[in-house]
Amino acid sequence: MNETNADKVEALAEIIRQLAAHYGLWLAESVHQLGLEAALDAEAEAGDRLRAVLKGKLERALGRESDGLLAGMDPAMLDRAAQALRTGWLAVDGVWFQSVERLAGMDAAKRVNDTCWTRFAPLEARRAKAILHLPGRGGISALKAGLAARMYGRLNKWEFIDETETTLTFRMNECRVQTARKRRGLDDYPCKSGGIAEYTAFAREIDPRLRCDCIGCPPDPHPEEWACAWRFTLAEE
């Protein structure tokens, strides 16, 4: 059988799908067997090793060992590829939520969603700290850097306001999920429970002294200029 380029692209997408599923299942079962903290420690080692392994394999496969895998590529093309993967990451939430909802109902989908965020948010915070070399107790400045480095940092429009040495307000001014629902004539998705789980876990992992309070998040009413808003406070020890 002669494979077309379209067939090969489909095969690559399938490989990415199964790679992501296998990695995710290892992480999920590690959380179940070892607890979240130990699982995140294991992910830090496994993820670094996997990144190096994949980079080496791709360089050898593409004959780019001498000058690096992506040397000479158009920077704009790399930016577009990165953004495509970020939006693909966001799509993971959507397709899984809808599938679980159809299978077991909205409550079940929200429970799965919220639990996933309690585990992914601290992982994302740890990755931001490692990549940006943030201190373990970096306070508000570390929180700002971590929030800006999140996947959402390049997907949604947001801002920091009312910043002091011990407080910060983060507003999501344009959320892709809610904007897409609005275009379809749907009400806001009620994401408050997931948001509380997500932002609380993220902030605590950045600095255990940080506390998070929800100013407003659907189904709460909110003004047109923002979709949700969160206040972070650095607690006294």
Image (cartoon, rainbow, N blue to C red):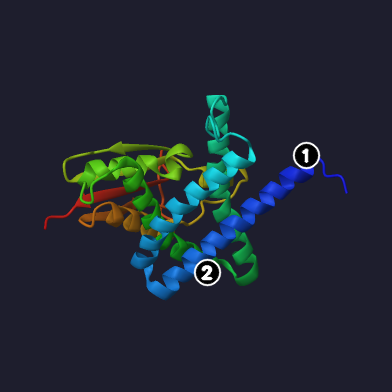
Q: Is residue 113 visible?
A: yes
Give left or right: position of 138 versus 33: left
Query: Which residue of the protein is positioned furthest toward the right in this rendering?
Result: 1
Residue holding disc 2: 107
Give left or right: position of 133 versus 192: left
Q: Position of residue 151 (x, y in %)?
A: 45, 44
Q: Position of residue 52 (x, y in %)?
A: 48, 47
Crowd class of label 1 (few under 14; some 14 to 19; many from 20; radius 10 Å) = few
Crowd class of label 2 (few under 14; some 14 to 19; many from 20; radius 10 Å) = few
Q: Is residue 182 visible?
A: no
Q: Which mark is residue 90?
A: none
Q: Camera-side residue: 197 or 21?
A: 21
The reply to whether callout 1 and callout 2 are in contact (CB within 8 Å) is no
Query: Which SS class for mark 2?
Result: helix
Residue flagged by tag 2: what amino acid is it? Asp
Q: Earlier in the sequence, mark 1 or mark 2?
A: 1
Q: CA distance from mark 1 to mark 2?
A: 42 Å
Give left or right: position of 200 versus 166: right
The image quarter containing residue 69 is top right
Query: Which residue of the protein is positioned furthest toward the left in this rendering?
Result: 237
Query: Which SS class for mark 1?
Result: helix
Question: Quick one: quadrant of the C terminus?
Answer: bottom left
* Residue drawn at 41 percent across, 44 percent down: 150
In this view, the mark in front (1 or 2): 1
Give left or right: position of 22 versus 175: right
Q: Position of residue 117 (x, y in %)?
A: 43, 59
Residue flagged by tag 1: what amino acid is it? Asn
Residue holding disc 1: 5
